[in-house]
Image: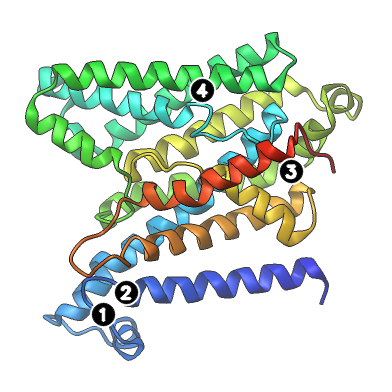
């Protein structure tokens, strides 16, 4: 068994083990035997089985899809801007999605008949987050076409993120107490509380975007990593590739952000871990590797949020930031400006 096959096998097993651990760990500790019974012979009225099937299983599916999606979006951003520090959180895409949700929810407070449900309207928040993420990505993409320096593009993204955050703060100032509380709780980031009804939106949208990414983009991303001139020489139109990446990244980031809130730094850390573990920068291998690694890391972060005590849970953003921020510092110290195949 070669290195790549071994890494895929171990990653898949790790995801299963972490998913089992996430099922067992929580306010109520659940044994493996009880988990098995909940799936094979669920009993109506059994509290443990109800918790497993209606709370913890949806949470795990949310964590897997969010981790895989955010990590893949980060990988696409790094190829799009040829910048190892590119990520939806660093470049302000997450803030853009958050601004879209903020505008939608604050508008609900002012015009309830127009927006119809605020944070309870699934399609409303998904579309708002998607449009916010896409608007920021298009601005950054336009800036990158005017600047050759990757550091300048990164700073533009950070500034756009600050502007989005400032606009969110202004909207919060004018919002009512109930709307503000709901938005603040959402902004902490969490994979808990997702219902099966919400998963009927989340899983198909993220699954479709990830599937299209793997089918359409590996060759183009490999070419972009080398440079635009090489991309054109192999018959690939860089503008078309950019548009596809922007649309798919916006769909992934917007959908996930709508249901989980903003998740920071995961998109930076995971692609670099995957490159090291799998020993390749070939996106045909790296894309599924990043998806698996992202799912595993998100499950691990969700487990770690429950370690301080059985009665409360830390925001998952705190854990992903503690893991991801040192990765950013490490990359900056090494001074890596780009990576090649």
Which of the two residues, 135 or 186, is positioned nearer the viewer here? 186
Report the mark closest to the observer, 3 or 1: 1
> CB under 8 Å between callouts 1 and 2?
yes
Residue 214 placement, left or right of 37: right
Q: Secondary structure at mark 3?
A: helix
Question: Label 4: which residue?
Answer: 158
Q: Residue 202, which numbered label?
A: none
Q: Secondary structure at mark 4?
A: helix
Residue ID at (58%, 75%): 13
Report the mark closest to the observer, 2 or 3: 2
Would residue 208 be visible to someone looking at this image? no
CA–CA distance between discs 3 and 1?
Answer: 42 Å
CA–CA distance between discs 2 and 3?
Answer: 37 Å
Q: Position of residue 151 (x, y in %)?
A: 67, 22
Question: Label 2: which residue?
Answer: 25
Residue ID at (77%, 35%): 220
Which of the two residues, 276 or 234, is positioned nearer the viewer here? 276
Most distant residue in the top direction: 146
Question: Label 3: which residue?
Answer: 218
Q: Earlier in the sequence, mark 2 or mark 4?
A: 2
Q: Position of residue 276 (x, y in %)?
A: 73, 56
Question: Label 1: which residue?
Answer: 29
- Tell me the crowding category of disc 1: few under 14, some 14 to 19, or many 20 or more residues within 10 angstroms, Cα based: few
């Amino acid at each position: 068994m070669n290195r790549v096959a071994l890494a895929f096998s171990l990653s898949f097993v790790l995801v299963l083990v972490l998913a089992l651990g996430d099922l067992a760990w929580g306010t109520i500790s659940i044994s493996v035997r009880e988990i098995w019974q909940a799936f094979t012979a669920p009993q109506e009225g059994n509290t443990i089985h109800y918790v497993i099937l209606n709370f913890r299983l949806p949470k795990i599916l949310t964590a897997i899809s969010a981790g895989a999606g955010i990590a893949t979006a980060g990988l696409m951003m790094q190829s799009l801007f040829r910048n190892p520090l590119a990520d939806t959180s660093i470049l302000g895409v997450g803030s853009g999605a958050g601004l879209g949700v903020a505008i939608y929810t604050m508008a609900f407070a002012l015009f309830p008949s127009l927006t119809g449900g605020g944070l309870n309207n699934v399609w409303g928040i998904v579309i708002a987050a998607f449009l916010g993420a896409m608007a920021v990505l298009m601005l950054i993409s336009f800036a990158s076409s005017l600047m050759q320096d990757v550091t300048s593009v990164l700073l533009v993204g950070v500034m756009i993120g600050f502007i989005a955050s400032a606009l969110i703060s202004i909207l919060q100032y004018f919002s009512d107490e109930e709307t503000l509380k709901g938005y603040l709780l959402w902004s902490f980031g969490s994979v808990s509380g997702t219902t099966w009804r919400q998963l009927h939106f989340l899983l198909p949208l993220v699954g479709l975007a990830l599937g299209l990414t793997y089918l359409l983009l590996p060759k183009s991303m490999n070419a972009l990593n080398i440079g635009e001139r090489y991309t054109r020489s192999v018959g690939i139109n860089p503008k078309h590739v950019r548009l596809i990446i922007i649309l798919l990244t916006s769909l992934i980031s917007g959908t996930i952000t709508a249901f989980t809130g903003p998740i920071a730094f995961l998109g930076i850390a995971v692609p670099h871990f995957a490159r090291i573990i799998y020993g390749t920068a070939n996106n045909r291998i790296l894309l599924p590797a990043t998806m698996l690694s992202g799912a595993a890391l998100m499950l691990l972060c969700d487990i770690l949020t429950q370690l301080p005590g059985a009665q409360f849970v830390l925001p998952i953003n705190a854990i992903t930031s503690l893991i991801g921020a040192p990765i950013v510092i490490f990359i900056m110290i090494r001074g890596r400006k780009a990576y090649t195949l």
